[in-house]
Image (cartoon, rainbow, N blue to C red):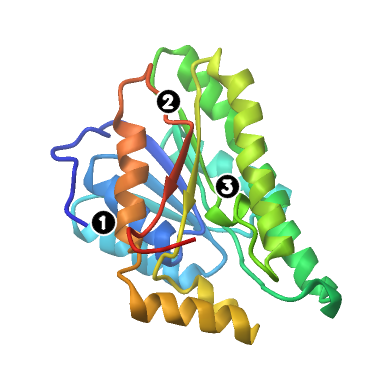
Amino acid sequence: MTSLLTGRPLDGRVAVVTGASSGMGAATARRLAELGAAVAVVARRKEKLEALAADITAAGGKAICLAADVTDRAAVLAAADQVSDTLGPADLVFNNAGVQLISAIDELKVDDWQRQIDLNVTGVMNVIAAFLPHLTATAEQGKPADLINTSSIAATRILEKYSIYSGTKAYISHLTRLIRVELGRKNVRVSAIEPGMVDTELPDHVTDPDASAMMAGLLSDIECLRDTDIAETVAFISALPRHVNISELTILPTAQPV
């Protein structure tokens, strides 16, 4: 994607990116750092986080890596304390960790159901609980404060075999609408992005043959979104004037039909 933003519009910002070890998270962490933010990258895979933080630092940015499982509330709270102690309170949270496991409902893959609920719902809530005090305190000081949640077009599309995944993403989208009502009056911006098909490793977790075939077809037949497209979108939302809140944004490849 051609960069829309130039200069360092995020100078002085402290960003937290979850799910940062690859894909949209890693690309967004790089872009936010390029634009001036100090970035804390959070995920389970420590070696990938360390490599990412080293790359950001080598490029002139500032980054710290925090290996944590967002489904572990205590670990996320500890990560929030580390961010505050090292970089200062977070004022930009990209709440991005998630997993996609597709199966027919009557296959009763209850472990996959629970894994998606744990990460896509509980993990998202743990991040909000840990970093919301940072965001409200920042907003009280008259500075920009952003909570950006990663949902999916699956939140609103009727896709066979996506029942649990779609349900978790619908939760995120509607949660975002609801908490924006409360936090907007505190001048905390709350946004949900709902990407279509992005060429990342997320489909690698999909074992259902029908879903795998559909994704493979999209990847080969159309120009899908890149992780850098999502990164630029998150950066744009964050760089807008403080009184402007893009609350929901659906991002599709131009040729994706559904």
**Image quarter of residue 161:** bottom right
Instruction: Answer few, some or many: residues within 10 Å of disc 2's Cα (few below 14, many 20 plus, some between 14 and 19).
Output: some
Q: Amino acid at mark 1?
A: Thr
In the picture of the structure, the residue carrying the numbered disc 1 is 57
Q: Secondary structure at mark 3?
A: helix
Q: Secondary structure at mark 1?
A: helix
Q: Position of residue 258 (x, y in %)?
A: 49, 61
Please name the residue shown 43% across and 57% down the image.
25
Q: Is 245 placed above or below 150 here?
A: above
Neighbor class of circle 3 (other Cα within 10 Å; few <14, some 14-19, many 20+) is many
Q: Nearer the viewer, mark 2 or mark 3?
A: 2
Identify the residue at the far left of this view: 7
Which residue sits furthest front? 257
Q: Helix, strand or loop at disc 2?
A: loop
Which quarter of the picture shows residue 102?
Answer: bottom right
* Image vertical order of residue 63 relative to residue 125, above or below: below
What amino acid is at disc 2?
Asn
Q: Is residue 39 above or below residue 183?
A: below
| Residue denoted by label 2 | 245
Percent x, y of residue 186: 55, 14
Q: Earlier in the sequence, mark 2 or mark 1?
A: 1
Q: Which mark is first along the chain, 3 or 1?
A: 1
3D distance between C-alphas at marks 2 and 1: 30 Å
- Image coordinates of residue 163 in percent, x first then y, are 73, 63
Judging by the rendered image, the residue that carries numbered circle 3 is 79
User: Residue at image x 30%, y 27%?
Assistant: 240
Callout 2 touching callout 1 (CB < 8 Å): no
Q: Position of residue 166 (x, y in %)?
A: 66, 57
Q: Earlier in the sequence, mark 2 or mark 3?
A: 3
In 3D space, how far apart are the residues under numbered discs 1 and 3 (Cα atoms)?
A: 20 Å
Camera-near label (2 vs 1) is 2
The reply to whether residue 221 is in sight is yes
